[in-house]
Amino acid sequence: MYIAIEGIDTAGKSTQIQALSKHFPNAVITKEPGATKIGKEIREIVLSAKAQSKKAEFLLFLADRAEHVKEVIEPNLDKMIISDRSAVSGVAYALTQGEIDKKDLVELNNFATNGNYPQKVFLLKLTKEELKFRLSQKKLDGIELRGAEYLLNIQNAIEEATELLGLDLVTIDATKSIKDITNEIIASI
């Protein structure tokens, strides 16, 4: 089974993936962007926020996604795959930019993924207050520097992106305890 843990920065994706990897010790753990050699370079470019064009940023994500699917997802479809983000995030970020038609977003992602999407998407959802608190506790990267409102728009767009891609979404309150969130994910798999 291929699942994705989605959520905005600081929602607890990494923490949950670490917990799930203990529960599923043979799972393939991956992330998007950055799971491949090329993906690491693309991730650095995107997080540096150097791209002036939002379309260019989107196309960088698509390039990473295509490489990720070829190198990681397709060879392991017979195993449990747990991904930190997925095409859902790419579509969500693009939706908030509003520069690419929704139909094109879906078609371009179908092209990049060869139609290989997570069978289940788990959204770790934060409140505005909790997000602001968590952001205040860390050094911010290029995406996080865009602010809480921007990230909350992304969070809402994750739900829309999942619907556009026709994927199964499970929304989880990210302010719950780590153990409760892990148990909720495991129960839904």
Image (cartoon, rainbow, N blue to C red):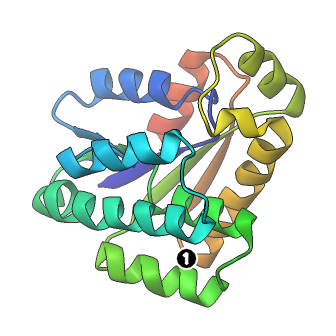
Quadrant in which the N terminus appears:
bottom left
User: What's the residue at 50%, 27% (across, down)?
Assistant: 182
| Residue 119 visible from this viewpoint | no
Answer above or below: position of 103 versus 67: below
Q: Is residue 106 left or right of residue 114?
A: right
Which residue is outermost to the top? 137
Q: In terms of secondary structure, where does tag 1 sit?
A: loop
Answer above or below: position of 160 versus 82: below
Count of numbered badges drawn on the protein:
1
Residue 132 % position (x, y): 83, 23
Residue 90 % position (x, y): 53, 61
Residue 151 % position (x, y): 74, 43
Residue linked to disc 1: 166
Q: Categorize mark 1 by other alpha carbons within 10 Å: few (<14), some (14-19), many (20+).
A: few
Check disc 1 and give the amino acid type: Gly
Which residue is outermost to the right? 129
User: What's the residue at 20%, 27% (across, down)?
Assistant: 25
| Residue 17 visible from this viewpoint | yes
User: What's the residue at 46%, 27% (across, down)?
Assistant: 14
Residue 76 % position (x, y): 14, 55
- Closest to the observer, 76 or 185: 76
Q: Is residue 154 left or right of residue 5?
A: right
State which quadrant residue 186 falls in.
top left
- Closest to the observer, 127 or 38: 38
